[in-house]
Amino acid sequence: MSKSKFRAKVIEKLQLTEDIFSILLYVGDKISEAVPGQFIDLYTDDNSYLLPRPISICDVDRDKAEMRIVFRKVGKGTELFSRLQSGEEVDIVGPLGNGYKLSDESLASGKVHVLLGGGIGIPPMLYLAKELAKRGVARENIKTVLGFRDATTFLTEEFEKYSEVYITSDNGEAGIKGNVIDGIREYKINADYLYACGPGPMLKGVKAYAAEKGIPAQISLEERMACGIGACLACVCKTKEIDDHSKVKNTRICKDGPVFAAEEVEL
């Protein structure tokens, strides 16, 4: 893991929807060792924006030392990133945080892995689906439930390379109407392991569903961050145990997360 800022080169920029953008970066050997669930800090060249924007890693090609990020344009910082063009360079730090843990037991033959992504929590699940497939999990045992706002979907065809895909949307314009937990129930999906990334209310639902069914679940928390390396305590969440760093019942999402066992955190 590198905590030093360095320049990454833009190989390709694509606009996936009106406000969702994909950027492929040449990042070098060290950064391309990132695992599913980690993120990078991305800096603008505008000195009026001192703090970086944390963006989840969507995919990595270690052989080419390339990394893909997919993000939503929501403010001035991400708007500046959306303007980047091939050949330009951008400052990044990473990979940061931890990733989803894949044990030998979980990878045993026949185990069903269910990936749940909501909104901009969808991109990091693509790298996880790819990694599960790479580590020998059969496509029919990787099931991805994606939650969108409406009929505007993205990345679905790429998920289909590695997993069975199920769609939900808030208004019912794509897939079934409801959230990803509604999707699990409606599509009658049985899981041995759950992995999720998305907004707080969705993760709260995933945590409750996992507890109800007795299924191990790992969730990736989305939070505004400042330093991205655990020094400033700007991004914390409540936990069951006392944190060694802060000495209270919370933990740093950027440093100790963003991925946690669902039962470890309070939502």
Image: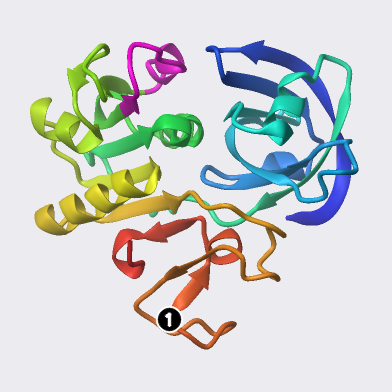
Residue pictured at 79% horizontal, 34% vertical:
27
Q: Residues within 10 Å of mark 1 (few under 14, many from 20)?
A: some
Q: Is residue 152 magenta?
A: yes
- Secondary element under disc 1, as helix, strand or loop, is loop
Q: Is residue 198 magenta?
A: no
- The chosen color scheme is rainbow
Q: Residue 7 appears in which quarter of the rendering? A: top right
Residue pictured at 39% horizontal, 81% vertical:
241
Q: In this picture, is 31 found above or below 264?
A: above
Q: Position of residue 192 (x, y in %)?
A: 20, 46
Q: Residue 228 appears in which quarter of the rendering? A: bottom right
Q: Position of residue 128 (x, y in %)?
A: 46, 37
Q: Position of residue 51 (x, y in %)?
A: 77, 50
Of the 4 image quadrants, the one containing the C terminus is: bottom left
Residue 96 appearing in the image: yes
Q: In this picture, is 244 found above or below 149?
A: below
**Residue type, mark 1 in image:** Lys
Residue pictured at 25% horizontal, 31% vertical:
141
Q: Position of residue 193 (x, y in %)?
A: 26, 47
Residue pictured at 34% horizontal, 69% vertical:
264
Of the 4 image quadrants, the one containing the N terminus is: bottom right
Q: In this picture, is 117 found above or below 244?
A: above
Q: Find the magenta span and give its range.
A: 146-162
Answer left or right for 146 relative to 27: left
Residue 64 appearing in the image: no
Residue 153 or 124: which is nearer the viewer? Answer: 153
Answer left or right for 39 relative to 76: left
Residue 53 or 244: which is nearer the viewer? Answer: 53
Q: Which residue is mark 1?
A: 249
